[in-house]
Image (cartoon, rainbow, N blue to C red):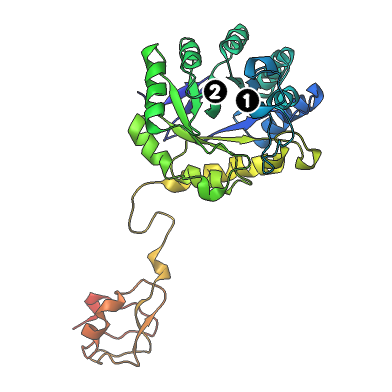
Amino acid sequence: MSNIVKIVARTIGPNHRPFIIAEMSGNHNKSLDRAMQIVEAAAQAGADALKLQTYTPDTMTLNLTEGEFFIDDPASLWYGNSLYELYEKAYTPWEWHEPIFNRCKELGIIGFSTAYDPTAVDFLEELDVPAYKIASSENTYLPLIKRVAKTGKPLLISTGMATVGELDETVKTAQDVGCKEIILLKCTSSYPAKADKANLLTIPHMRELFGVPVGISDHTLGIGVAIAAVALGASVVEKHLTLNRSDGGVDGAFSIEPKELKALVEQSQQAWQAIGEVYYGPTEEETVKGRRSLYVAEDMRKGDAFKAKNLRVIRPGCGLPSKYYDIIIGRRINRDVKSGTAVSWDLIE
């Protein structure tokens, strides 16, 4: 496997700045105009990509309202809906995809989507999307993995809920049908997710285990967890984007707003730049002049002895290091010097 993936002209991997994906999901609130505004907001904030979700209520579930088809958990954002009703509210009409992707191209960002079943892949292939995403809920849906992998396009896979064994099976399934560019996204599949459940140390472990770029699909509130993920080596960050959380919507509560996306773009790049390498000692920008060192503290004549009153440990750091103070005390100077002279070995008799 390769630790580098290329989507359109953008190279993704450890030695490249983080690839930032704005996830629209259902935040269009059933308005194409709002969807277009989200695309524009993503581009203006500096995101690399805008991602949709491609499904219909009928490709996701059955139109039933009882039993396990009803969301009866009071803690859920979607409590009181059936699964079918939720997907009916959230799905992006398929006829919107092409104009949205065209707008992405006009604005210079990459448009692609999460395919939830083989019919979605067939449709997205007609639009020639440059990459595919697999949601956490589908990462064990091996027939779908095969269908997407056979397109030969880069594949991003969210890893929520999956065991190591399941992920291994998923990755091998994609590889076996010829997929060579895979990115795994650490994900906690709760909405919103709690920071203490993010387990970001999985990111470097997953990268080492599978030998592919690893990122994060982040459902926590704010951008702090995403920035921490980049510091731990995440090459991709995906966050849900809304124009304004107060507008509501199925995903609004755990989505970020445009100003937060802009901060994420800027701060994730800073976090990536800060990783650097293992390094000790002063950098080019640092100066040892900020340290203390040995200085003559009053005028001295040749033959005078160094004493506490005329030898000081002060800033700047242009003289001998302070560790030589006890060695030099009592020794004599070999020429006349003025106060403020940096002590060096060639001044000592």
Find residue 265 and name its label.
none
In the image, residue 344 lies at what x, y percent?
A: 27, 75
Question: Position of 147 compared to 100: left or right?
Answer: left
Q: Judging from the image, what secondary structure is the residue with disc 2 in?
A: strand
In front here: 113 or 13? 113
Can you say which quadrant of the picture contains the C terminus?
Answer: bottom left
Residue furthest toward the front? 67
In the image, residue 326 lies at what x, y percent?
A: 24, 85
Tell me the distance, in whole angstroms, between the alpha carbons under discs 1 and 2. 9 Å
Tag 1 and tag 2, C-beta contact below 8 Å: yes
Density class for disc 1 (Cα within 10 Å; few <14, some 14-19, many ≥20) is: many
Question: Position of 275 compared to 342: left or right?
Answer: right
Can you say which quadrant of the picture contains the N terminus?
Answer: top left
In the image, residue 131 lies at what x, y percent?
A: 54, 18
Of the two numbered discs 1 and 2 in the rendering, the one whose residue sits closer to the viewer: 2
Name the N-terminal-most of marks 1 and 2: 1
Find residue 51 and name its label.
1
- Tell me if I can see residue 65 in this picture: yes
- Residue at mark 2: 133
The number of numbered discs placed on residues in the rendered structure image is 2
Identify the residue at horizontal 67%, vertical 22% (top origin).
104
